[in-house]
Structure formats: structure tokens, C-alpha cells
Image (cartoon, rainbow, N blue to C red):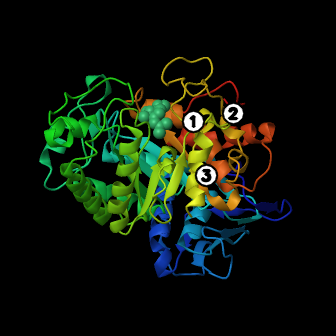
Amino acid sequence: MSLVPRPVSQIGDPAAAPFRLTTDTVVVTEAVTETTADILATALRASTGFALPVGTDDDAPRIRLSLDSTLSSTGGAYRLRVTEDAVDIVGTDLDGVWNGTQTLRQLLPAANWSTEPVTQDWTIAATVIEDAPRFAYRGAMLDVARHFFTVGQVERFIDQLASLKINHLHLHLSDDQGWRIEVDGWPELTRIGASSAVGGGAGGFYTANDYRAIVDYAADRRITIVPEIDVPGHTNAALSAYPELNADGVAREPYTGTEVGFSSLDIRGDATYRFLDDVFTQLAAMTPGPYLHLGGDECLSTPTEDFLLFARRASEIVAATGKTVVAWHEFGASPDLAPGTVGQYWNYVCPEAGHAEKLQSFVRQGGRVIMSPADAAYLDMQYPGIEAPGLAWADGPTSIERSASWEPTVMVDGVGETDILGVEAPLWTETVDRTETLEFLVFPRIASVAEIGWSPRRPLDWQDFRSRLAGVAEGWTAAGIAFHRSPEVPWFD
Ligand code: TNX
């Protein structure tokens, strides 16, 4: 069975008898790991048809989940031991237990990802895996502003991310083409601002309850939601809803194209900061995770002096909510970052002029960074030989091999291992308006970024990686994921 991301160590025991999942198997858990046990048992009941009761009975053949904080000081670490009698998953924390269950599912026959019962032998070869993540932040981003995705679509995506041990989902909740989150006291944001999308689609938005449902669903799968309200550029949707957010006091027309860089909040107006205060205070209250992302990218129509003024004031507003600010790397132009501000890098693996300095600024001011190089980690780039869906601006098309070949610590001088919080693969959705298209662009390249974020550093072993991709893709097939069957990978059929 193939594992992606590659674990720190795996030692098989071919001479030992395998574990066999049967009608008699039980899932043994402590109270604190019960949510993880229930999610695992629910999935395996669907595919195996077995009862798989969750409880504390330790006599039967079992899958046992437990916590042992002495296992490792690295959050998310786990040990998984498979013997004839038991699968034992020990996590150093709840994240570790969860991660162990995702490895277990990759060890099981691929049909365990099916949502229909499958009749077959459910054996797992005897093995011991010791594993821990390289980076604390392993992320994906979904742009729900260019096209809207429903709660159900986002939950499906969350399941897919969790299977690769990704633990952050960044939601790009606003842009020129749409505003996607309800804000008390600002009803036109959703009445007008949410009614557009790229290409003139219907749009949509999350109510506060919808958003909480996503947050909770993600939390049960050990995924932190990182909400982004992109300001002061990328704001046409807000500017169309409220005239007072515009410097000239005139509401903009809704926008359905794909240009960037033409919109800006009124940097000198009080309404702008009242607006940001309400938005970020409410978003903070709905978001249990530590981060609020305020965008800050491509502010091509905001004069530099205004941008710096805005960066300081907007940072203060977000910091006052108690959350850590995250911003795209252009924000590093500001000398007034809030303490601990995290910079997200979107320029190339080999930085173009002017970009490295901005990223270094976050580190100099005491923060850390998330690496999302557009020419390697952007999921919305075209695949070689296929013109749609996808964009090509970031040196695209982007092959799977390229998506797997970059090393985050050697890209920007002065930004090394301990400065890097982690990696993230963004999916911008100018060309994506449905689940099948999303899955086609995301899979398999998301697996590359998951492996870079999780596995111990080493140069890409392409033959090994592509054959492991082919292995895990059997599970993608069983799960009904519409992945791209790229000729780069030796798929099984
Ligand atoms: C650039 S890179 C953007 C987005 C676009 C994306 C398309 C960055 C932070 N912003 O506004 O959707 O390119 O690939």
C-alpha cells in the first residue's frame, strides 16, 4: 500500500501475520479521541458493511486509538503499529491520533474509501510507522469568491484534504467578483455583493451558521479554517454594495470579469475602518482558529503611501480581535506589521525582483511565513497539454513533477526552516465552477504540496513519488474523486 505523504519511518514485518478487519473488529477509544474514532468507524462501516462498534472493550480484535503526550514534542506526531491482533494508533496529541487514522486508511485496501459496501478481504500487513510533520502548517486555499462553493462542496473538499494530512483550509471569502460571508449590520454585502461571480453566475454566500458548520466540520477533522477578507484591493464586490467605501462616494457596478488590481477601498475615509472593524470582529468571533487573513495582494490602484497607512490601521483592527494577522507578501512593505504577522508568499520559486524583500520583512519584524510559490504550488495553473480548465500566468502549465520538486527553505535568502510556518496550495477559481473541475485541478498536485509540508526534507525521488501517487489514487478512484489521469503517473488502470 502506498503512503502519501511519505512517513518518517516505516518498518514492515513480512514474516508476521497480517491484521484482518472483520465483522468482529471493534474500535477502542478513550473519551477524548471519540470524535476521531466515530469518523473512522463511520467511514469503514460504509465501505466494509461491518458493525465496527466504538467502545472501550479491549478483548476483541481491535483498532485502538490513544493519546500519549510523551511520544513526541512535535504536534501531530503518531505511532501506528499493525500486528495480527490489533492496529494500535498512539498520538502525541489529538492531531496525532487523527493523522494516524489517515495513515491507517492508506494502509487498508483502496476500497475502504468507497461509500458503498464492498465485499473483499480487508487485510493490512504487519508494520510499525513512526511519523511526525515537518511543518506545523500544511494548507490548501479555496477561492469561493470568483465562484461560490456550497457548504456540502467545501465539506467534501475538507475530507479530501484531511486524507493527505493537510491541517489548514484558507477560505478566500471576498474579491472583486463576490462577497461570500454574512456580516451583521452590513446587509448589502450579501444582498448585492454576493449576487455576482466570474462569468455572470448566480453567486452565493455563507450565513453565519453555514460558516460555523464548515468550521465545525473541519475542526472534527483536525483542520483549522483560515478566513480571508481581501483588502484594500480585490474589493469591487464590497464597493458595489456600499457607496461610502469608495473614495468618490459612488457605488461600483458588480464585476464578473477576471482582471485584477483595479479596485481599492477608500483609504482615507472613516467608513472603511468602521466596516473593517465590524467585519473582522465578527469573523474573529466565528473563527476558533488563531488566524485572520486580510489579503493585501495586488493593490495596483492604491498609491504606496495610502497602502502603508492602510496596512497599519487594518493590522491594528485585526490584532485587536486577538487573532494573528496573515497577509500576502506585499504587506511586508509595511514597517508597522502587528506582532507575529504571518506573510504568505505567492511569487515564484526563484523570486522576481522586489518580492523577496517583502517576504523577508515579515521575518525581520518577528513573524513567520507560509510558502505558496505560484509556479509550483498554485492548483489553478493548467496541466501540460490541456488548455482548460486553468490559467497559465505563473510560468504555467505546471506539471505534477514541478509541483513536487520545490524546497521551501532555499527559495528566499534569510527565510529558512524555522522562519517557515508551512506551505499552502491555493486554488483560485476563475476557471472553476463545479466540484469535478475543482478535483481535476487539485488532484494529484495537492498531494505534492502535502508531501513537501509533511515529509522529512530530501530531494524529490520522482520515480518513487509517482508510483506512490498511483497507489493512493486507487483510493481516489474508490472515493469518486475526479482526479487528472496525467500521463506523468503510471496509474494502475
Ligand atoms: C493572482 S497571487 C492572485 C489572484 C488570482 C490568481 C490567479 C495572488 C495573491 N492573487 O487574485 O486569482 O493570481 O492565479
Residue type at the position of mark 1:
Ala
For marks 3 and 1, give the CA distance: 18 Å
Looking at this view, is 59 or 154 the one in front?
154
Query: Cβ(mark 1) to ligand 1 < 8 Å?
Result: yes
Numbered disc total: 3
Give the foreground label among 3 and 1.
Answer: 3
User: Does 176 sit above or below residue 422?
Assistant: above
Q: Which mark is residue 436?
A: none
Whichever of labels 2 and 1 marks the residue nearer the N terminus, that label is 1
> Nearer the N terminus, badge 3 or badge 1?
3
Please name which of the two marks, 3 or 2, marks the residue nearer to the observer.
3
Q: Which residue is drawn at 52% across and 77% down?
A: 29
* N-terminal label among 3 and 2: 3
In three-dimensional space, the C-alpha distance between marks 2 and 1, rounded to whole angstroms, equals: 11 Å
Q: How far is mark 3 from mark 2, CA to CA?
A: 24 Å
Q: Nearer the viewer, residue 332 or 107?
A: 332
Q: Which residue is drawn at 78% across and 42% down?
A: 460
In which quarter of the view is residue 315 placed?
A: bottom left
Q: Mark 1 points at which residue?
A: 374
The residue beneath circle 3 is 360
Amino acid type indicated by mark 3: Gln
> Quick one: SS at disc 1?
helix
Q: 14 or 265: nearer the eye? A: 265
Compared across the picture, whether 374 is left or right of 488 comes to left
Q: What element carries label 2?
A: helix
Question: Which x, y percent locates residue 462?
Answer: 78, 37
Label 2, on which residue?
Answer: 402
